Amino acid sequence: MSVDANIDICEVGEKKPRPADDELGFGTIFTDHMFVMEYDEDTGWHDHRIIPYGPLSFEPSSAFFHYGQTAFEGLKAYSADDGRTLLFRPWENARRMNATGERLCIPPIDEELFVRAIEELVALDRDWVPSAPGTSLYIRPFILATERYLGLKPSSSYTFAIIMSPVGTYHGRGNDPTKIYVETEHVRSIAGGVGAAKAGGNYARCLKAEVRAARKGFHQVLWLDGQEKKYVEEVGTMNVFFRIDDVVVTPPLQGTIMPGVTRDSVLTLLEDWGVKAQERRLSLTEIADAHRAGSLQEAFGTGTAAVITPIGQLQWDDLTMEINDGRTGDITGRVHETITGIQSGKVVDRFGWTTEVPD
Amino acid sequence: MSVDANIDICEVGEKKPRPADDELGFGTIFTDHMFVMEYDEDTGWHDHRIIPYGPLSFEPSSAFFHYGQTAFEGLKAYSADDGRTLLFRPWENARRMNATGERLCIPPIDEELFVRAIEELVALDRDWVPSAPGTSLYIRPFILATERYLGLKPSSSYTFAIIMSPVGTYHGRGNDPTKIYVETEHVRSIAGGVGAAKAGGNYARCLKAEVRAARKGFHQVLWLDGQEKKYVEEVGTMNVFFRIDDVVVTPPLQGTIMPGVTRDSVLTLLEDWGVKAQERRLSLTEIADAHRAGSLQEAFGTGTAAVITPIGQLQWDDLTMEINDGRTGDITGRVHETITGIQSGKVVDRFGWTTEVPD
């Protein structure tokens, strides 16, 4: 852990009051500290440091104010019953952050430094990791392009930071099945685009469809492929799985959807359980046919923030598809219980997914 | 001009040294002042003010650090020979900023306030408007989503700012014809996306293809449609025009390309001159056929930063198309001379495009 030696720590004078576990929402309250470092072409990433959480200051000509050259990640730390603090597959986030960076011309970060920075920061703010069921410490690493230049080119300088927020459930609806609206006008992503990257612009472009769906009474939007608007891509901030005729189907990773860490974990679990699963294109017509035939058994979304979210209803134009009578399905429930169990140390981690945060 | 009354002005104590007109690049030097205002849902846009140019400070949880909810505009102020300072069609920028905002769930800005803020700021920093041929004061209005929340939703608060930079030519190559690489892998935009909006994410996603093209010796990339990768969309930061068989053709505004102010001005001029022009889909195959037949007469890009840029060469896979022997074409030259003439007050403005900045 030679990298650790480089992280300077400047602790806050007075710690903030922490909210009670049963008062937690999502992403509005932040811990006492944050990790920050900068990049320039001569020095590379430098000035690794943990400092009190607080505002960052940038010239108004900074590239990321104008051209969207930003990347982020999301992962969580969990309190185990035995007192350990666990991270869930943080190396996957390190890898994906660099994959996003590669697509957006952002220089890579040493993956060991990425994970160690998270570990050091969580260790320092360990008191902030909540322990009630369904709660966790959400960790948000992000990169901003900071060159002071209005021409369009990859920035020559960057700021990387990690902030952390104690959270309850993302949707504030517990684990109730969600109602999804199939978006047929707006498009999230296309082959040759940046749909597989955690790039800021991917999220801004989704807002309007999500607002429209919410006004119609739906919780999230299901995105279709950009070419033909026929095939399932992903749901809001989640990957999506459909169980049809005892086969669990999820769209393949072909560059247009988020390569979710939870998605990958679910596929691993299904294989381990001997549940037949397929990564393949899945059309809305196939889903509607299965629904009509009574073979659409269950559906769920997966994501770090949303964990495992059962889907109770799907609206495609005029067709309302109730799924599993609006109840959480068998596989959905088992996946949810197993993943959250491993994350919180209640279920034996046979896959080596969890990492203990050292003291 | 009742709106003006609301703009508080706090002048700098000591003005910065100004660069000489012949030393100007693009977008690295900024004037003494900037305009700033904030938005929240209760108050709307408020605290309109002009203050010394300097850093802005934001909480690291601010929405635009993460989700790309940003919008911008670009226009220029010009020194006329008679001493007047002219803006070119600023109301078009006001309208387009709100069109971008509408697509990204950003609240609208009063268009009169938008233009008055620019006028007040330019008037205060009038000394910064350069006067050498080809120079101007580049004006950059932009909006940032500032709500301190990591959930994905339209921000409830925003910062709007205007900064200004005295500039020479965008490419630093004067008006030499540019070499363009037709991008056939990456895609800039698609129907149902945000390609017609000046959204930050549209620019970040283009960087990698532009870097690759530059490594191959090209100045810019020509983007094709996202559905079939057959039809011309736009070039780098410009709209694009091709003259084939005495007809000037440019792609239509169907939501995937930038509705350029210069593009619109060029179409108006061509109509005024009796030059046949068409807004229609144009395939690379048609361009290649015309090139082979000797009927591809000229091509040029248009944009606020790039003005009118002649295109001397187009590379489409293995096909190298030299256009007009790499020289600036007749229509290109005439359009360039007329637009820059109107902008700088040398050519009579019969279209009411220029606005004089009042004292």
Image (cartoon, coloured by chain):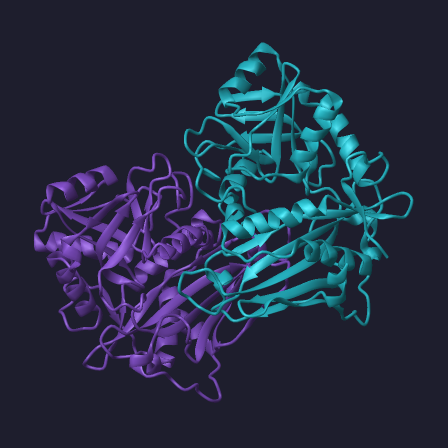
Chain colours: A cyan, B purple
- At 36% from the left edge and 57% from the top edge, which residue is drawn? B214
Depth check: A197 or A225 in front?
Answer: A197
Picture layout, residue B11 above or below residue B289:
below
Residue A7 in view: no
- At 51% from the left edge and 53% from the top edge, which residue is drawn? B69
State the image coordinates of residue B250 (x, y, percent, origin top left). Answer: 22, 47
Picture layout, residue B298 above or below residue A179:
below
* Image quadrant assignment for residue A168: top right
State the image coordinates of residue B82 (x, y, percent, origin top left). Answer: 19, 81
Picture layout, residue B358 above or below residue A113:
below
Residue A206 in view: yes
- At 22% from the left edge and 60% from the top edge, which residue is drawn? B177
Label total for image: 0
Q: Residue furthest bottom?
A: B14
Which of the image's four quarters has the N terminus of chain B? bottom left
Task: Please state if A94 lies on the left or on the right of B179 as rendered.
Answer: right
- At 83% from the left edge and 56% from the top edge, which residue is drawn? A126
* Image quadrant assignment for residue B91: bottom left
State the image coordinates of residue B225 (x, y, percent, origin top left). Answer: 34, 40
* Image quadrant assignment for residue A39: bottom right
State the image coordinates of residue A214 (x, y, percent, origin top left). Answer: 56, 38
Which of the image's four quarters has the C terminus of chain B? bottom left
Depth check: A146 or A309 in front?
Answer: A146
Task: Please state if A52 lies on the left or on the right of A83 as rendered.
Answer: left
Task: Please state if A20 lies on the left or on the right of A141 as rendered.
Answer: right
Q: Residue furthest right?
A: A82
